[in-house]
Structures are given as C-alpha cells and as structure tokens.
Amino acid sequence: MMKRRPLFIGLGVMVVLVAGALAVYFLTDIGIAPPVDTVSVQLSTSLDARSVGIVIAEEKGFFRTNLLTVSCEPGSGRIDPVRSVGSGIHTFGFAGAKEIIVARSRGLPIVAVAALLQYSDEAPAIASYAQVLFTTDKMVSEFPERVKLFLHALLRGWQDVIDDPEKAISTLVSQNKGLDQQHEIVTLRALIPSLTADINGRIGWMEYAPWKALYEELEANGLLDDQFDPSEAYTTRFVDEIYRRD
C-alpha cells in the first residue's frame, strides 16, 4: 500500500495567502474590493466523480481564499479541451498526457502542470497520466502565481475528497441531481489509488520517465508531426513549490 504524504503549503504560497488575507481585511475595511483573478476551466468529462475535486475546492472556498473566481465548463464530445485552452477560450483544461504530447508536436503551446490520474510503476508507461491539468506556455511564463494558486486550491480540494469520499460525493450529488450517489462513490473509490500513485502519495506529481516512454511510443507509431524534448510537455515547478520538495 502506498504511503500517503499530507499536502503541505509551500512557503511561497503561504506568504501569498497571508498577504491576500491581510489585503482582504484592510481593503474591505475601507470599502475597496481586493483584486480577484478570474480563470475558466474546460473539463474533459461531465461533472462527476472524476472531477469532484474541483467541486469541493469551490464548495469549501479554496479558490476564493486564493483570490480566484473560477468558472467550470463540463466536457462533452463536441469540445476539445486542448484546442479550447490552446486558443485562449479557457485558462485551464484536463486531458490525457497523450493529447498534450501530440498537440505540442503540432505546434500548440500547451503544457501539463499536474497529473490528476496517475498509474503505479507496475502499469504500462503508455497508460500513465490519464488525466493532467494543463494550461498554455504563456500562462506559465507570464502568470505563474495564478497557475500556482489555482493548482494549490485544486489539490486541497482533491485531498479533502480522499480524506472523506462519501461527503465529497454527497456534495457533488446535491449539486447535480442526475447523478446516482452509489455509482459515483464506487467510481471515486476506484479512482483514488490513481490519484496518489506517486511513491510519496503526492497528488498531481509527475516524473520524466512516463512522459518519455509515452513520447517514444507515439513517435514510433508515427503520431507526432514534429520532434521535441518530452520534458517540454510538462512542468513540475508548481507541484514542487507546493509540496516543498526536499
């Protein structure tokens, strides 16, 4: 059984949160609204157990604490999250690592910042990182704090889901009456091991080896338009800061 390491707030994020809280206090006291960043998210699926982490992050105010207003668009067969984010329609999106690599080979400047559904080392590398959170190169380079604060809130949401799956699903179902609670609980419990497949139990963590293996598999099958370094398809700078990697 994998050891689960609790989610720690990186020092940089903690400073931002403290500063943000003080700003809210003082600015509200004199009648000035604090600055709030607005971001939009394109899911790859419907709003269900696979995306309950973002629901809990919103419900518990984790985004608001980080001075973010988040709008979330459920996935459908008609919407391609990769193109939606790459074209600037949405700030963040969810897709498989395969889609990120193929898109970059075609010149679309998107980059994964966390892996939300992982697989253990025993699983084939080609199947690793079935769902990643991604954004654009521009967002990472020009608005890194926004990326970090969004990811920090999202990881807190998923940690709460892991800590109390039944409560998380109850919250989800209360907001979407079309869902079957028992089915969603069963689905979530099956997903949880993949959320913490990192050896230290870190939600969102990524390693180079699975990305390289997937890149080489896609290249061997002739699915890449242009070659590039697989390390360009993702960045661990944000999860690294959040978890204060030793």
Image (tube, rainbow, N blue to C red):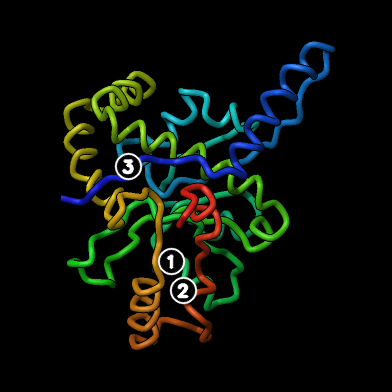
Q: Earlier in the sequence, mark 3 or mark 1?
A: 3
Q: Amino acid at mark 3?
A: Arg
Residue 137 appears in the rendering: yes
Residue found 22% across the figure and 71% down from its top: 124
Q: Whole-percent x and y of residue 196?
A: 29, 49
> Who is closer to the viewer here, 14 or 141?
14
Against 16, residue 177 (above or below) is above
Q: Indicate the quadrant where residue 15 lies.
A: top right
Residue 79 appears in the rendering: no
Are the residues tagged 2 and 1 within 8 Å (C-beta)?
Answer: yes
Residue found 59% across the figure and 69% down from its top: 108
Q: How many marks?
A: 3
Residue found 61% across the figure and 32% down from its top: 66
Residue found at the far front of this picture: 246
Which residue lies under the disc numbered 1? 99
Q: Amino acid at mark 2?
A: Val
Which residue lies under the disc numbered 3? 50
Q: Is residue 218 left or right of residue 246?
A: left
Asked which secondary structure carries label 3, the reply is: helix
* C-alpha span from label 2 to label 1: 5 Å
Q: Whole-percent x and y of residue 80?
A: 48, 56
* C-alpha span from label 2 to label 3: 23 Å
Q: Whole-percent x and y of residue 17?
A: 63, 32
Which residue lies under the disc numbered 2? 102
* C-alpha span from label 3 to label 1: 18 Å
